[in-house]
Image (cartoon, grey):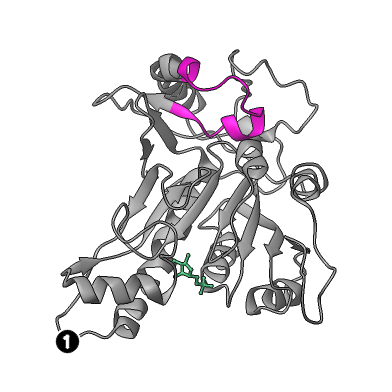
């Protein structure tokens, strides 16, 4: 298990806040020793991780904001170093929803019970009346609307893309963006503001059954119609296209020949609630490395 530090302590890479004198994007990472039973072993292992990361860190865009970059370590193929983690304060998460938000709830629950070292600081939705937004309000989580709502009771509400990015980064100080059933296209501006720091969950095994038009029950219908015998959720980083960003994790469930799309959906959703928090925990801990060819690697917590 990870060794975590008492909440609120300002140690570790993510401990540095905006304007706190972060080094240049390609420069050395800031580090302070975290209190731990064996601090020297931890430091050595982390240094090894950083050493292995150097080449790919240099290959990654230097324009990345320091906050997002902090989770980015890298390793050459087949040479994952031994490592342990520095303690760090909870990561600040913004979650985007359009529906009931069961994935958001799973992530929020994992933040509350310590499986994720994170805090949900904002919920964004295109539908202010959706279940996910109600849940956020009930739990005292600030909610934002994006994009502008054109019809109905909420007509006229909503932020522009620049206001959204500004709000998430500067008002809520969000470090990571998690799409959890958000149905609108994500603006390029947001992708660029959160490089390698935005995840999505898709209810199929990408790159199959993905892309424009493949969402919700449509994915499960297509899976059943195809005769595929396996399906499952994919967690991937978000780029400016639909469902094409680098795959971080997948879970596989069977599809039986007698299954309805609803049955498949229920089986997949159960796995979603496990795999998404698992990935978010890794993101918050800095346990994601990047292979030189752009494939992310999730290190399991020890
Ligand atoms: C999930 O199936 C997820 O894979 C997809 O949208 C659905 C959201 O469900 N992106 P919920 O709102 O989290 O219950």
Is the C terminus in the top left, top right, bottom left or bottom right quadrant? top left
**Outermost right residue:** 156
Q: Is residue 8 left or right of residue 114?
A: right
Residue 86: image location, x then y, percent? 54, 33
Q: What's drawn in magenta, residue-wise?
A: 57-73
Q: What residue appears at the point 53 percent right and 34 percent down from the top-left corner?
A: 71
The stretch drawn in magenta includes residue 249: no
Pick the front one: 289 or 14: 289
Q: Secondary structure at mark 1?
A: loop
Q: Is residue 43 left or right of residue 14?
A: left
Q: Could you tell me how many numbered marks the image carries? A: 1
Q: Is residue 149 left or right of residue 182?
A: right
Residue 269 higher or lower than 166, as above or below = below
Q: Which residue is mark 1?
A: 258
Residue 7: image location, x then y, percent? 68, 49
Pick the front one: 219 or 74: 219
Q: What residue appears at the point 41 percent right and 54 percent down from the top-left corner?
A: 235
Query: For residue 120, what is the image quadrant?
Result: bottom right
Pick the front one: 259 or 210: 210
Residue 158 seen in render: yes
Residue 93: image location, x then y, percent? 64, 52
């Amino acid at each position: 298990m990870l060794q975590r530090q008492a909440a609120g302590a300002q140690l570790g890479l993510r401990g540095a806040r905006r304007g706190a004198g972060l080094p240049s994007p390609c420069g050395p990472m800031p580090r302070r020793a975290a209190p731990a039973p064996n601090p020297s072993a931890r430091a050595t292992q982390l240094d090894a991780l950083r050493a292995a990361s150097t080449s790919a860190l240099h290959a990654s865009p230097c324009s990345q904001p320091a906050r997002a970059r902090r989770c980015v370590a890298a390793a050459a193929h087949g040479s994952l170093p031994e490592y342990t983690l520095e303690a760090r304060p909870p990561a600040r998460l913004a979650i985007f929803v359009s529906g009931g938000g069961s994935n958001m709830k799973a992530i929020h629950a994992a933040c509350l019970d310590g499986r994720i070292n994170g805090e949900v600081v904002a919920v964004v939705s295109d539908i202010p009346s959706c279940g996910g937004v109600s849940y956020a309000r009930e739990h005292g989580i600030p909610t934002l609307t994006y994009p502008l709502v054109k019809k109905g009771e909420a007509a006229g509400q909503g932020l522009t893309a620049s206001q959204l990015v500004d709000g998430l980064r500067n008002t809520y100080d969000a470090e990571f963006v998690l799409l959890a059933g958000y149905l609108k296209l994500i603006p390029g501006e947001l992708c660029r503001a959160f490089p390698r720091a935005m995840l999505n969950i898709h209810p199929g095994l990408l790159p199959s059954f993905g892309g424009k038009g493949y969402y919700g029950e449509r994915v499960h219908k297509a899976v059943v119609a195809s005769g595929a015998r396996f399906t499952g959720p994919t967690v991937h980083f978000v780029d400016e296209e639909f469902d094409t960003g680098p795959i971080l994790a997948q879970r596989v469930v069977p599809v039986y020949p007698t299954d309805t799309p609803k049955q498949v959906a229920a089986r997949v959703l159960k796995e979603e609630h496990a795999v998404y928090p698992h990935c978010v925990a890794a993101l918050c801990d800095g346990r994601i490395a990047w292979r030189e060819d752009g494939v992310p690697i999730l290190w399991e917590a020890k």
